[in-house]
Image (spheres, rainbow, N blue to C red):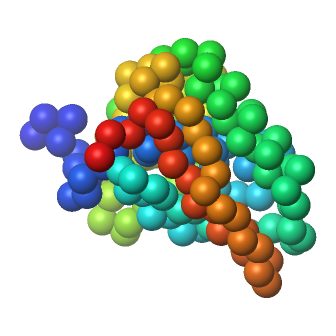
Amino acid sequence: MDITTLNKSNKDYCPEMHTAEHILNQTMVRMFGCGRSQNAHIERKKSKCDYLLPEDPGEEQLAEVEKRVNEIIAKNLSVTIEYVRKEEAAQWVDLSKLPDDASSTIRIVRVGDYDICACIGEHVQNTSEIGIFRFLNCEFSQGRLRVRFKVSGAQA
């Protein structure tokens, strides 16, 4: 079996939007100490992610998230993929969302030195391909922040 076909996704990913999600997740982790998104729906025209937070971050902090995501995108970071044994991957990334039938070899995606996670989706090769990241709206209710966003590089 060709290693590049392990854990192949059945989704139609938008590489620009999906890579922006990685950057958004890492920015949320760094700014708020929360986990990566609890629920994500990544589409070409607009996407959403949910984060568990103890309080509403407010407009000012969300504007800072948007700013930081765009700063990372502007760094023109390489997006790389490597395949490693699950045991080795567990030293670097959270594997709790892996399905029970995941193979013993895991695909790791790195966005420069900013983000690393296990992922089977499609990504850009460089963050310069993403375009501008923008929140469409953000809602906080009962400890859950839902953000909807788009990127200018994602073509319908």
Q: Can residue 120 be seen in the rendering of this structure?
A: no
- Position of 10 with respect to 125 (left or right) is left
Q: Position of residue 40 (x, y in %)?
A: 50, 63
Residue under the image location 25 percent in, 57 percent down = 11
For the residue pair 113 and 106, the one nearer the viewer reads as 113
For the residue pair 89 and 152, the one nearer the viewer reads as 152
Q: Can residue 63 be seen in the rendering of this structure?
A: yes
Residue under the image location 55 percent in, 18 percent down = 77
Residue sitting at the far bottom:
142
Q: In the figure, residue 74 lies in which quadrant?
A: top right
Image quarter where the N terminus lies is top left
Residue under the image location 79 percent in, 84 percent down = 142
Number of on-image labels: 0
For the residue pair 4 and 66, the one nearer the viewer reads as 66
Residue sitting at the far left:
1
- Position of 8 with respect to 116 (left or right) is left
For the residue pair 122 and 47, the one nearer the viewer reads as 47
- Position of 122 with respect to 5 (left or right) is right
Q: In the figure, residue 73 lies in which quadrant?
A: top right
- Position of 26 with respect to 103 (left or right) is right
Q: Position of residue 35 (x, y in %)?
A: 70, 58
Q: Is residue 138 above or below residue 82?
A: below
Q: Position of residue 141 (x, y in %)?
A: 77, 81
Q: Is residue 78 above or below residue 54?
A: above
Q: Position of residue 76 (x, y in %)?
A: 55, 15
